[in-house]
Amino acid sequence: MSLRFRRSMKLMPGVRLNFSKETVGLSFGVPGARYTINSKGRRTVSTGIPGTGIYNVETLSSGTRSRRSSAAAIAQETETWQAPPAPGLFARKPERELNKFLLDIYNSDHRDDPSSVIEKANALKELYPELKYPLDLISFLHGATDEKWETDVAKWGATLWEQRDAAFSNKYVLKYFKGIKPGVTISPGITTQLHYNVQTLGFIWSEILQSLKKYDDAVAVLMQIEPDQMVGISLADIEISVGDFDGAIETTEDIEVFDDATAMMMVLRGVAFRGKDMHEAAIECFKRALKQKQMPEALAHRALFERGVTYGLMGKKAMGVKDLEKILVDNPDYPEVEKKLAELKK
């Protein structure tokens, strides 16, 4: 089956982000009057009568989510490390020591625990204050994977986010961080695949704020990073968390499933419809998401779980049991699946 490559995401009232295969664009206005500009410089104005399909386009120029710890949002294999570039023949001592530090903590034969990494980073920072930004970013990243560092990580995150431009323009960060690729779980079933940059820091910090139930602050962070599918997923997830189901439905409107991210957005759309007791609409969303071929197991399980729960609410217990038992075949430890099965089998 062929699916058109198109997606659109609400950023704020009256402003939407539009994607196509070649471009990304912003659209401003209200139904019946919109101004659009895309990444290729094409600007258009559309006017018309909403609901009629009559428009004139002028080209001007060519579930509810349960609270989880911040540590759970960072993948256990936090870093995919590529060998760092050589410091260079004339590199100064601080850079050489940073290079040694990275080779040590990302040694393929062993991985230091977060406390050990943070201890080594602090010791090195005392010797070479100019390494502050790369070492603080490393400490924050590793501390975020361990709940015992939760209080410190919250402080570090606030500071680093405020200083993010300076941190990621640091010469050592620019040179050595391209091989560090944290896995950040934006929503159960979908994980970022970016190197450690401002975008990744924003996602990690937003997840930490959500774990602290500071949802408004988490949204504010997301609105300050480059808008993409992952931002849309995270926004919809937050809206569901706070019971803003209408907001989540609006955030995920005009979605067509063509990859893992859009499949996840369709799942969240289904969860939002379920939150409004619109169960048939929810089931249709889950069905569309599950049509995505070769999706990751975690994403397929999320869609099956949400559909199974919805079937249960509709009184279709046998169908709900069937979906949930499919998950058990691959992952008997999937959160809450045993509990939901027991409820459906009563």
Image (tube, rainbow, N blue to C red):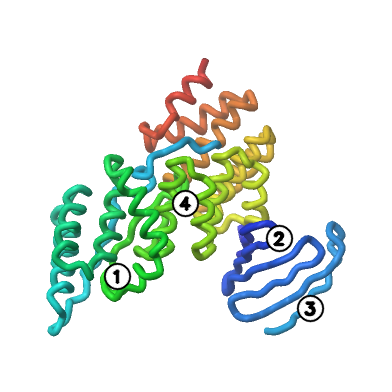
Give residue 58's mark.
3
What residue appears at the point 64 percent right and 57 percent down from the top-left corner? Answer: 12
Q: Secondary structure at mark 3?
A: strand
Residue 115 x/y as whole percent: 20, 47
> Which of the two labelled residues, at mark 1 and mark 4, occupies the earlier sequence position?
1
295, above or below 304, in the image: below
Amino acid residing under circle 2: Gly
Between disc 2 and disc 3, whose residue precedes?
A: 2
Q: Residue at x 52, y 41 (%)?
A: 303
* Mark in front: 2 vs 3: 2
Q: Dividing the picture into quarters, in which one does residue 60 lie?
A: bottom right
Which badge, 3 or 4, is on the more N-terminal residue? Answer: 3
Residue 139 x, y percent position in the rendering: 26, 55
Q: Earlier in the sequence, mark 1 or mark 2?
A: 2
The front one of 191 and 28 is 28
The residue under label 2 is: 14
User: Badge 1: few (under 14), some or many (20 or more) residues near its Cα, within 10 Å?
Assistant: some
Q: Which dot, 2 or 4, sits closer to the camera?
A: 2
Residue identified by numbered label 4: 295
Please name the amino acid that badge 1 sits on.
Answer: Val
